[in-house]
Amino acid sequence: MNTIEKDPTCKSRIDSHLKGREEDFLLFMGCEDLGEAVSEELGSFFDYGLCFDLVEAHTFDNQEKEYYRYQLSWGGPSDEIRFFEDGTIEYWFLDWFDGAKKDITKNDWAIWLRDCLTEGA
């Protein structure tokens, strides 16, 4: 029987992408000066993300709550970290009409990131 392989879903790929981001942020957390490069590949914390912006409620279909988005990459695939008013922090991995999320609210690096982005580094 010949079967057509289906592209892997975001749900099946999110853990490996999240692990890579976590490793990067742990490196940044260990820096005394966030303006200095942690490696040639990563650069500095200030060069890492694409943007930090407010996504108002109802910007997207079925999106009831506003959130702050730290966009890490875009296109297909893309990933971002979402910060909600109630303190929830989520990592999202998105790829052409598919998406998956993980609650990272209790991760030390996610709390550190939220504090850096909202209080200044």
Image (cartoon, rainbow, N blue to C red):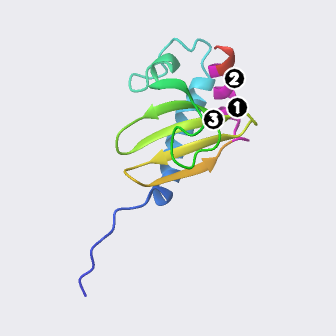
Tell me whether circle 1 and circle 2 mark residues in contact (CB < 8 Å). yes
Q: Is residue 14 above or below residue 65?
A: below
Specify whether residue 47 is painted magenta.
no
Give the residue pinned by disc 2: 115
Residue depicted at x 61% and y 49%: 102
Q: Is residue 80 above or below residue 13?
A: above
Image disc number at residue 111: 1
Q: Quadrant of residue 116?
A: top right
Q: Secondary structure at mark 2?
A: helix
- Amino acid type, label 3: Glu
Q: Earlier in the sequence, mark 3 or mark 2?
A: 3
Residue 40 x, y percent position in the rendering:
39, 22
Give the residue pinned by disc 3: 66
Q: Is residue 76 above or below residue 12?
A: above
Residue 24 x, y percent position in the rendering:
52, 32
User: Is residue 15 shown left or right of residue 32?
Assistant: left
